[in-house]
Amino acid sequence: MSISCDANPKNGTSPLNVLLNANAQGGNGSYSYAWNFNDGQSQNTINNFVQHLFANSGSYTPNVVVIDGSGNMASALCPRITVQNPQYPISASCIANPTTGDSPLQVAFIGQASGGLEHSHTNGLIMIHI
């Protein structure tokens, strides 16, 4: 008896939902499958596939053990699953008013930023004498 395992997708951002599929050959009777996702969770099924949600970033190598109707066992490592933290783009802008004039020139700068992990906004007014 032998078994192989595949995964789709093999990488992405968290939370990542992955379909694991096992292909067992040989043995006697029906199969049962014991899945270990190597993220602290496991699951037993009678199906040769399982969906699993990898909630945290990291690298995981799940494995599966198949047992046939006579109690024979085979195991396989599934492909490595790489889960990354999602990226949160940050943008910023600044406006100066006035942009020209005689010295001494009082200029107001207004800045705004958005994005980041907590999606916070910062607005500010700075007065500079030039």
Image: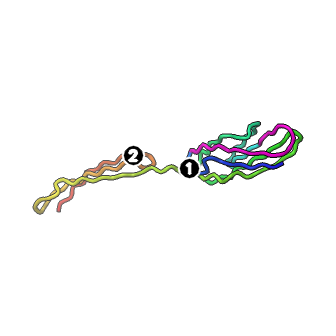
Q: Quadrant of the C terminus?
A: bottom left
Using the image, determine if residue 38 lies above or below residue 45. Answer: below
Q: Main secondary structure of the magenta part?
A: strand
Residue shown at the point (88%, 42%) measured from the top left = 71
The quadrant in which residue 70 appears is top right
What residue sits right under mark 2 in the picture? 120
Q: Which residues are magenta?
A: 15-33
Left or right of residue 69: residue 129: left
Q: On the picture, is 82 further left or further right than 49? A: left
Q: What is the three-letter code of the residue carrying label 2? A: Ser
| SS at circle 1 | strand
How many callouts does the rendering have?
Answer: 2
Query: Residue 121: x percent and y percent?
Result: 36, 46
* Residue closer to the observer: 116 or 73: 73
Residues at discs 1 and 2 in contact (Cβ within 8 Å): no
Q: Which residue is mark 1?
A: 12
Q: Nearer the viewer, mark 1 or mark 2?
A: 1
Q: Position of residue 24 (x, y in %)?
A: 78, 45
Is disc 2 placed on a helix, strand or loop? loop
Give whichever of 15, 110 is nearer the camera: 15
Residue type at numbered disc 1? Gly
In this view, 33 is above or below 94: above
Residue at 33% x, 52% y: name it: 92
Q: Is residue 21 magenta?
A: yes
